[in-house]
Image: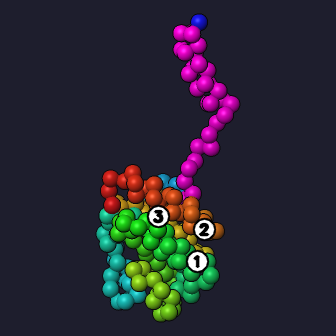
Amino acid sequence: MALIVVCVLPVAASYFAFYVWQPSGRSNYGALVTPTLLPDGALATADGGQFAREDIKGFWTYVVVSPAACDQACQQALYFTRQVRTAQAKESTRVARVWLLSDDGTPDAELLAKHPELLVARADRKWLEQLDGTAVAQVWLADPRGQVMMRYPTELDPKGMIKDLARLLKYSQVG
């Protein structure tokens, strides 16, 4: 009788777990999107240089898409991406941040001074189409191969972002 219970119990528990007590099925905060390679071509940076997809290869990269007249949502997105990167401690060197300007404006110098390792580039039409560039600040996460793979909601939760990035850095073999 004990042998039958030992053999049947795991099967019964698996059926119960699958049909009755189903797990939520999602543990990430950001929404996974179909990995799409960022566009080719160089973009002009705020300091007069050039930025291309190749510059972020090898890094997990937060991409914030917003107009240069950075509103409260944009400032919060920039702040949270900085804090999430900092929260990774010794792994923070594997994370980059890019602010893609969706218009022709000039970002505030005081705001840029608060984000010393932020790369600022003016997005062209191809980048904006791919990243759904609108007037609302949006945060995307690109993998070390230069593919956008996650999009965050407009109302950001830094704890969820930290958890997502920590898990990716822990299990990633690249970047």
Instruction: Give the residue at x 35% y 78%.
Output: 51
The residue where tag 2 is placed is 156
Horizontal side of 1 relative to 112 (left or right) equals right
State which tag comes first along the sequence, 2 or 1: 1
Asked which secondary structure carries label 2, the reply is: loop
Label 2: how many Cα within 10 Å (few below 14, some 14–19, many 20+): some
The residue where tag 1 is placed is 76
* Residue 25 can be seen in this image: yes
User: CB atoms at circles 3 and 2 under 8 Å apart?
Assistant: no
Horizontal side of 113 relative to 159 (left or right) equals left
Label 1: how many Cα within 10 Å (few below 14, some 14–19, many 20+): some
User: Which corner quadrant holds the C terminus?
Assistant: bottom left
User: In the rendered image, which quarter is residue 10 located in?
Assistant: top right
User: CB atoms at circles 2 and 1 under 8 Å apart?
Assistant: yes
In this view, which residue lies farthest toward the front?
2
In the rendering, which numbered label is found on residue 141? 3
Point out the frontmost of discs 3 and 1: 1
Instruction: Give the residue at x 48% y 75%.
Output: 82
* Residue range of the region highlighted in magenta in the rendering: 2-30
Instruction: Give the residue at x 49% y 81%.
Output: 101
User: Which corner quadrant holds the N terminus?
Assistant: top right
From the top left corner, tell me how far across and down residue 153 is, in percent.
60, 64
